[in-house]
Image (tube, rainbow, N blue to C red):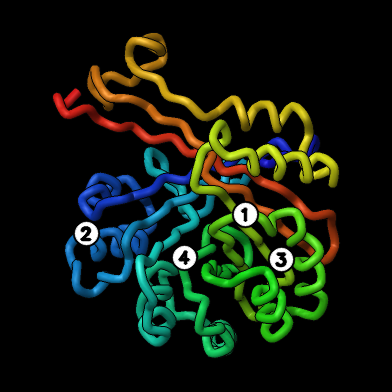
Amino acid sequence: MRLASASGAVDFALRLAERAQARGLMDRVASPHLRSFLRHWYEDAAYLAPVSSVWLEFDLNREPRGSEAGSLPLPVVCAQFGDRVEPRWLIDSLLPAMHGSPLNPSQRRLLHRCLDALPAAGRILYAFSLRSRPGDAVRLELCGLDPAAMVAYLERVAAPGAAARAGALIPLIKRCERLHLSFDIASEISPRIGLEGSFVHRPHREPRWSELFDRLMASGLCTPEKRTAVFGWPGYDSLWTASDRWPDDAAGLGGFCVRCLSHLKLVSWPDREPEAKAYLLFQHLRTRSGG
């Protein structure tokens, strides 16, 4: 959810936390390469062993690409890693499988450059195929770097001015835990830079969430209404508290739908004002009785 007053677009991402969950989606996606990727992740545990989970993100404000009647549109495809990955496997095998074609020579060269320059403390947490969006880029999201290391790394690999623009946003999130850095790679490294941060505990137990949103509002990146909506999201529901909305056919009669504030993302651009987004999580948790 975008937090500025003029930004109403909302995206939806689905996490496949277990390989078996891919089986239910293989026949619902129109893209042959995405069906193949999900099938390989489900069936070939050794080949895609480093991939701990898969995210499918649907841009609800864009005209879908590669969709057919009755099927899901082509999403952004994201692979999450539980540990370090070997660069050659990432560039030669995983990203082409997610993207549906070999990466072009410029992408390969730039990916090698970015991975060679990555400090020892940093690692790839997510790799994305952005084929569903114009430009056919791929994205890397890195973790393990502190704010100073992020800026220094961008100075080495990113477009001119990108490090300074991202550095100007770091004071907003410097007290966050779990900092992430992301950027896109097509024929060149995009000047768009993403910075993410979050806290382990929920807002009612972590006052730094409130302080973070105070800084966003003071910078004009968040409206009071969006702040209220974000802080009103965490909680849970069950059949008994939301009987008129409970999806009993899919979820059964028991369990809980838990809602959390996942993380915040700041995006810097060379030709527009920065943008802030909040990522809201919800998940159905079953009870032991099997409800």
Foreground mark, 4 or 2, reads: 4
Label 3 to label 4, Cα distance in Å?
17 Å
Q: Which residue is mark 2?
A: 42
Front residue of 163/99: it is 163
Residue at (29% x, 59% y) in the render: 38
Residue at (40% x, 9% y) in the render: 244
* Mark 1: secondary structure: loop
Residue at (20% x, 23% y) in the render: 291
Residue 77, horizontal then vertical, whole percent: 44, 59
Label number found at residue 192: 3
Foreground mark, 3 or 4, reads: 4
**Mark 2–mark 3 contact, CB under 8 Å?**
no
The amino acid type, in three-letter code, at marker 3 is Arg
Answer with mark 4 or mark 2, whichever residue precedes in sequence: 2
Residue at (52% x, 37% y) in the render: 202
20 w.r.t. 95: above or below: above
Label 1 to label 3, Cα distance in Å?
21 Å
Answer with mark 2 or mark 3, whichever residue precedes in sequence: 2
Label 1 to label 2, Cα distance in Å?
35 Å
Label 2 to label 3, Cα distance in Å?
33 Å
275 w.r.t. 7: above or below: below
Crowdedness near tag 1: few (<14), some (14–19) or many (≥20) residues, C-alpha within 10 Å: some
Answer with mark 1 or mark 4, whichever residue precedes in sequence: 4
* Mark 2: secondary structure: helix
Q: Which residue is mark 4?
A: 126
Crowdedness near tag 3: few (<14), some (14–19) or many (≥20) residues, C-alpha within 10 Å: many
* Quarter of the image where one finds residue 204: top right
Label number found at residue 176: 1
